[in-house]
Image (tube, rainbow, N blue to C red):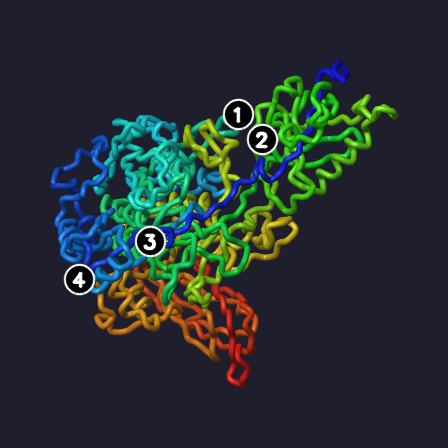
């Protein structure tokens, strides 16, 4: 057959082994040997409980040295700066006394947010520690996992939020965002500090350092990237740390951490060039914010809670303003409530120190109760689409057009080219006609005259999702098995064979590829992605529902262009590139972290709850065409299986970046409110004491989750009737509000007052009276709206799950 064709399109089959990644969960390891890592908390309060306010109000550098406003961040080759601290010595002394003469290995001393340590011991030794009067709690370590060029425009930043902050040149300036992730590539232009001629001082309240290693040399940090550390002691003790690919430094060998950091705070106007093609210019949400990296997740195994808690503790001590965690636990925390786990409790102390904590909801949707972020003090973000799409198509010789994906150029103009299967393109000497190795084009030597490639999906693969993949040559990937069958039927029916030998004598099928480099912006968006984890928020391991709305809202998380590590291996198709297109709630969370930095910049005195309120009450309920936001309901054919999003899909709605900077009213909560809530959980007093060192008896009253002053109302079980109160504070000028509402199905509500005038700085209490009118265990949804005469609109989602009326004897 050689010589019958000179330029052709090669057709290749895709099996799951080619493009599908494998999601592996690292087991905790406690059953694999006689020792395990335990997180031990002591009863004495940590340093932040005494010095948290000092940290927020001082301009003094660590150790009392005044900071030069234009200083460069400190480099430090030492991996542990706290080993000689007083609290660390107390921990060492306790271990020596309790485990006298026995073998153990202390991994970390936590001293800022939590007074405790992580230690490698046997279960018997852990039991000895738990019986000591100084010890509050002993918890087994557990594993965790990782859960843009256009999204600034889609969110309206250039015309809205950035001008309010003085333009992109100053958006986020003075705010430090900390990232608990896989590290960072410091050489990426998204994190250089020479992109502006304006002064770019390191914030005086930040006291972090930059580790210096062979992979992260001196000078890696600058006035943009102002802190970088890594935490891997728990992983190393388990023997899962691979130094050749995980890097014992802040350097990102995965790509995920570089991506998330640039989404939130990457420099403005960085060209996105992938496979030689220019896809526009990238910018973070807060391009002038500063970046501090706390690497606690790794390519080969994910991460462990002991390392994550150490990273959170250090970030808080360093003085970050916002903390972004694109990570979730591999399992639902055991115990009396999901809120009681080392990571969430460390973040509670971070919130007490004034740090706004953002966490990805998880990629375990679309099932109900698939949420992986639980606590009311954590701002949980789900993933939604935006309006940009890259479409690619192949036109067959029978005038059938098949749509696919692929960030690739098209074939030459209107020229139709011969289609040849990879198996059929072999030389005559090759006899392996069914070799999958050849069919998947893993050996390109036989196809060096190909003008392009068409990948089709194995017809036996059902419901597999593919993202656009960059290609330097003309190409397309057909992700639909049904469309793949159409292609194969046309191809096979066009073959001509020798009647005697059955060898192919002519390839009759032709096609041309239109290309997928040009984006279109006509998609209806946003829509909640199928993988985005859903509420209701599970309160415990028995999957009882909490009176807390999760997720808090949704943000762009699908097909997000952002920076990529030069040695990143998390996504093979972007290996060696400076940018990558990724999808997940991991990409949604840093959008909110960056927008939170803009809010913190405008309102420096805002508490974390006030920032959460500003983001929530201004969220949009409608897509870009004015219709309801839709939620995908199935992994297979998600665009067909969708319906209107509920609060358990999208929280308060889709983030409104401009509106969040002018919310009008805010719902505020403080650390003591969260403590009263935790103390109100049945049987929680000893657990609260264990984690916080505080006695629930010191709180005069406790509250339920429904009574937290959240910008939403969620009632897991409505027995007959309930009165809910919310207080709002006016941060704008004097304004008169009228109150409107729509009741959930099976429920009646009234709100008092129905109209009120509120002065600047004044606080008002709203009472919401909720009555069940039917017996039902099916969730229903409504909304309360506060409409100000100066243009402010405050949106409060209302969700009621179980409803029980007066006259029932039925167990619901």
Between residues 106 and 277, which one lies in front from this camera angle? 106
Of the image marks 4 and 2, the number of the one nearer the N terminus: 4
SS state under label 2 = loop
**Is 495 situated left or right of 683 in this image?**
right
Q: Mark 3 points at which residue?
A: 141
- Give the numbered dot on residue 275: 1
SS state under label 1 = loop
Q: Name the residue under label 4.
A: 134
Quadrant position of the N terminus in the picture: top right
Identify the residue at image location x=24%, y=55%: 114
Q: Do the residues labelled 4 and 3 touch (CB within 8 Å)?
A: no
Q: Mark 2 points at which residue?
A: 407
Locate residue 507, reporting x and y percent.
79, 24
State how far apart marks 4 and 3 are (Cα).
20 Å
Visible in this render: residue 602? Answer: no
Locate residue 786, reporting x and y percent.
45, 62
The image quarter containing residue 789 is bottom left
In the figure, 517 relative to 720: above or below?
above
Q: Do the residues labelled 2 and 1 touch (CB within 8 Å)?
A: yes
Identify the residue at image location x=45%, y=52%: 361
Of the image marks 2 and 1, the number of the one nearer the N terminus: 1
């Amino acid at each position: 057959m050689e010589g019958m064709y000179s330029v052709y399109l090669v057709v290749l089959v895709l099996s799951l082994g080619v493009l599908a990644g494998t999601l592996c969960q690292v087991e905790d390891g406690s059953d694999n040997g006689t020792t395990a890592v335990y997180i031990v908390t002591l009863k004495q309060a940590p340093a932040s409980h005494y010095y948290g306010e000092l940290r927020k109000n001082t301009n003094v550098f660590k150790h009392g040295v005044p900071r030069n406003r234009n200083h460069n961040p400190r480099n430090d080759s030492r991996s542990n700066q706290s080993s000689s601290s007083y609290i660390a010595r107390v921990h060492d002394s306790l271990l020596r006394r309790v485990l006298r003469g026995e073998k153990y290995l202390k991994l970390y001393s936590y001293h800022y947010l939590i007074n405790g340590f992580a230690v490698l011991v046997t279960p018997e030794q852990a039991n000895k520690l738990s019986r000591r009067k100084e010890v509050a709690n002993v918890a087994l370590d557990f594993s965790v996992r990782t859960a843009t060029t256009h999204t600034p425009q889609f969110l309206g930043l250039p015309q809205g939020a950035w001008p309010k902050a003085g333009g992109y040149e100053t958006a986020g300036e003075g705010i430090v965002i900390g990232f608990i992730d896989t590290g960072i590539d410091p050489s990426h232009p998204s994190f250089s500090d020479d992109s502006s001629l304006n002064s770019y001082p390191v914030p005086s309240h930040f006291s972090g350092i930059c580790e210096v290693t062979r992979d992260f040399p001196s000078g890696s940090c600058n006035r943009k990237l102002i802190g970088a550390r890594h935490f891997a002691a728990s992983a190393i003790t388990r023997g899962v740390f691979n130094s050749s690919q995980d890097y014992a430094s802040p350097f990102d060998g995965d790509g995920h951490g570089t991506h998330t950091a640039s989404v939130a705070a990457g420099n403005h106007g960085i060209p996105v060039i992938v496979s030689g093609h220019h896809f526009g210019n990238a910018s973070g949400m807060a391009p002038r914010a500063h970046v501090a990296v706390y690497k606690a997740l790794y390519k080969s195994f994910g991460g462990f809670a002991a390392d994550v808690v150490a990273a959170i503790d250090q970030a808080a001590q360093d003085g970050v303003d916002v903390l972004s965690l694109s990570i979730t636990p591999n399992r639902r925390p055991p115990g009396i409530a999901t809120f009681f786990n080392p990571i969430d409790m460390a973040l509670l102390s971070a919130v007490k120190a004034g740090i706004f904590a953002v966490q990805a909801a998880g990629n375990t949707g679309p099932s109900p109760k698939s949420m992986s972020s639980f606590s009311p003090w954590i701002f949980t973000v789900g993933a939604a689409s935006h309006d940009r799409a890259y479409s690619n198509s192949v036109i067959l010789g029978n005038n059938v057009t098949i749509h696919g994906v692929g960030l690739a150029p098209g074939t030459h103009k209107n020229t139709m080219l011969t289609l040849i299967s990879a198996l059929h393109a072999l030389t005559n000497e090759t006899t392996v006609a069914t070799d999958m190795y050849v069919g998947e084009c893993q050996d390109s030597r036989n196809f060096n005259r190909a003008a392009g490639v068409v990948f089709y999906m194995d017809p036996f693969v059902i419901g597999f999702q593919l993202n656009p993949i960059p290609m330097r040559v003309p190409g397309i990937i057909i992700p639909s098995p049904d469309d793949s069958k159409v292609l194969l039927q046309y191809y096979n029916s066009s073959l001509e064979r020798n009647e005697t030998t059955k060898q192919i004598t002519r390839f009759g099928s032709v096609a041309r590829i239109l290309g997928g480099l040009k984006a279109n912006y006509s998609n209806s968006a946003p829509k909640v992605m199928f993988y985005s984890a859903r509420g209701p928020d599970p309160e415990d391991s028995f999957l009882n529902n909490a009176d807390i709305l999760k997720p808090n809202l949704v943000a762009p998380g699908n097909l997000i262009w952002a920076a990529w590590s030069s040695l990143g291996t998390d996504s093979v198709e972007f290996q060696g590139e400076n940018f990558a297109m990724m999808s997940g709630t991991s990409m949604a969370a840093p959008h909110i972290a960056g927008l939170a930095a803009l809010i913190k910049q405008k309102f420096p005195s805002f508490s974390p709850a006030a920032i959460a309120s500003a983001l929530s009450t201004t969220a949009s309920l409608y897509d870009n065409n004015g219709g309801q936001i839709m939620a995908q309901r199935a992994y297979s054919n998600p665009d067909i299986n969708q319906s209107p999003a509920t609060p358990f899909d999208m929280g308060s709605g889709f983030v409104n970046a401009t509106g969040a900077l002018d919310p009008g009213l805010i719902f505020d909560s403080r650390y003591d409110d969260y403590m009263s809530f935790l103390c109100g959980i049945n049987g929680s007093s000893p657990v609260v004491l264990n984690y916080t060192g505080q006695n629930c008896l010191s709180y005069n009253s406790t509250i339920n989750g429904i009574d937290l002053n959240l910008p939403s109302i969620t009632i897991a079980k409505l027995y007959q009737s309930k009165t809910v109160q919310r207080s709002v504070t006016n941060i704008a000028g004097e304004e008169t509000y009228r109150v409107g509402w729509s009741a959930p199905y099976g429920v009646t509500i009234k709100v008092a007052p129905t109209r009120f005038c509120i002065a600047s700085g004044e606080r008002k209490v709203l009472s919401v009276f909720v009555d069940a009118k039917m017996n039902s265990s099916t969730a229903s949804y409504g909304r309360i709206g506060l409409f100000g005469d100066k243009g402010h609109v405050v949106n409060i989602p209302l969700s009621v799950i179980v409803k029980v009326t007066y006259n029932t004897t039925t167990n619901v």
